[in-house]
Image (cartoon, rainbow, N blue to C red):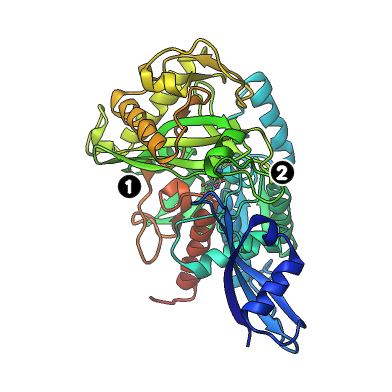
Amino acid sequence: MSQFVQFQVTPEQAKDQYFLKKRIEDELNLSSSNFEFIWRKRSIDARKSAIKINCTFEVYLEGEQIPTRVFYKSQNVKEKEKVAIIGSGPAGLFAALHAIELGLCPIIFERGKDVRSRRRDLAKLNKDSIVNPESNYCFGEGGAGTYSDGKLYTRSKKRGDVLKALEWFVHFGADKDILVDAHPHIGTNKLPHIIVAIREEIIKCGGEVHFENKLTNIFLENKAIKAIELNGKNKLEFKNVVLATGHSARDVFELLHAKGLRLEAKPFALGVRVEHSQAFIDKIQYSGRLNDDFLPPASYSLVSQINGKGVYSFCMCPGGIIAPCATSEGEVVTNGWSPSKRNNPYSNSGIVVTVEPEELPNYQKNNPFVALDFQKSIEKACWEAAGRTQKVPAQRLKDFVDQKISKDFPRSSYVPGIVSIDINTILPDFIASRLRKGFVDFDKKMKGFLTNDAVVHAPESRTSSPIQIPRDSISLMHPDCDGLYPCAEGAGYAGGIISAGIDGMKSIDAIYDKINGIKE
Ligand SMILES: Cc1cc2nc3c(=O)[nH]c(=O)nc-3n(C[C@H](O)[C@H](O)[C@H](O)COP(=O)(O)OP(=O)(O)OC[C@H]3O[C@@H](n4cnc5c(N)ncnc54)[C@H](O)[C@@H]3O)c2cc1C
């Protein structure tokens, strides 16, 4: 039987295979050096100035078989029962793979383009401020996760599901390190290849992937889904439809509402994206040591309670770039991405506060769009303030806290450009004041964080969905529509690549149970 061993080493020792083998031999008192060891967990302990790496290894002695674990089962499903999946984000793609495993035939309809064609639209968005409403950082093959940092950590509690999701990424081309690192990430340069490999697998197994096919209508009969309409013309009959359209598909929320299906306003997060130099963050986090071949670019995770409400960092991208993530003309939205090496000179993170529908000025109890309308109004106000292009309002961090307009800026990674504006005048005071206090508090936790060499970009508004699409907790179907499975981030049940993927799989489990008459 294999044995586990844990110890701490320096970052240099963690990269030295010879040293590690000797250390394992000593730790386990082994009499022979004929053994295999496999990394199982790796995390950085940077709490003290002497930085350490926590290591966990699984050790197999000579003659012990290293088991091969199968996490994905491929099969031909061409003639099997068809399931429509709307959206090819992490939820849609993982739903499709799981459908194949369970012997169902996935048919994906995606409003955007394939990853390659999508890249051209992103270039136009960055260079010419042209927003293609069907092909952008949120819409297109792979969904919002494609051109991201590809962070794969999640608060999801079910370790088995998380491991399966990570193993799938490895199966389709991700580096095995993601199975080991405490904070795994893939990177924008690698994600598109993985997504293409997933698409090829779906098609090879008899499933279908249709790009530039937007869901424009649904047809119900006796409170059950009967058919879907694509691009305003093609009507196709389906008994089971997974709705995995993400948090930016505002037209889908409107469609469901128009069809009389219930929606609910839900709390969501809104704030700004702050950018420091990566070298500066490394210095703070690594006690003066700059990152080198032995340590990755440093990250941070900050949270503070201001008057009983959380202010927190979200989707921190070490060595990253701030991206224009609008999905329509007339709005600006920021988010961040990093390449696999995280080797850009900038470090950015969303800093957001939770917004409860009840605290909004336009709150009405029965209006499911109250939080969405507010989100839209902030994105529009930032667009107008910064000159009606994809430039965004910006302010040096300390100036933001002092409510002073910045006279000049250090370089920003945000390609469309920035405009000097007091962001406090755009964000409502209940958000801006919490952010200001949060930044002051963050500086106590991470000495030096509140510096005028950092730049605030606004707004960070698409971290979570402002609407929940209700679903039954067991059947996972919409309570007003049998056969409709709202899932993942857009429906308010997930946040992030891994949890969205897992929720997509859960929808397929529910469809499988329904088809096979399995009751919980
Ligand atoms: C720039 C950026 C960086 C990010 N970085 C990270 C990160 O590092 N780690 C992380 O965990 N999360 C990250 N996220 C968030 C993450 O991408 C999302 O949480 C995740 O993609 C949600 O998955 P989803 O499948 O629910 O929805 P989405 O990924 O939003 O996918 C929805 C899909 O549905 C399609 N669609 C919408 N409407 C229709 C329609 N009517 N008909 C047909 N198709 C439709 C869309 O085009 C889209 O492809 C990032 C997001 C962005 C934008």
Please determine whether, in this image, residue 428 is positioned above or below residue 169.
above
Q: Which residue is mark 1?
A: 262
- Establish if 99 lies above or below 516: above
* Residue 318 drawn at (x, y percent): 59, 40
Q: Identify the image quadrant of the N terminus.
A: bottom right
**Marks 2 and 1 close (CB-CB < 8 Å):** no
User: Mark 1, residues whose alpha carbon is within 10 Å: few (<14), some, or many (≥20)?
Assistant: some
Would you say the beta carbon of the disc 2 residue lies within 8 angstroms of ligand 1? no
Neighbour tally class for label 2: few under 14, some 14-19, many 20 plus, Cα within 10 Å: some
Q: CA distance from mark 2 to mark 1?
A: 39 Å
- Residue 360 x %, y %: 27, 31
Whether residue 315 sits left or right of residue 279 in the image: it is left
Q: Residue at x 63, y 34 (%)?
A: 135
Q: Nearer the viewer, residue 457 or 80?
A: 457
* Residue at mark 2: 189
Task: Judge from the rendering whether residue 260 lies leftward or rightward of residue 171; answer left or right.
Answer: left
Amino acid of disc 1: Arg
- Name the quadrant containing residue 436: top left
Residue at disc 1, secondary structure = loop
Residue drawn at x 44%, y 33% is: 461
Q: Is mark 1 within 8 Å of ligand 1?
A: no
Q: Amino acid at mark 2?
A: Asn
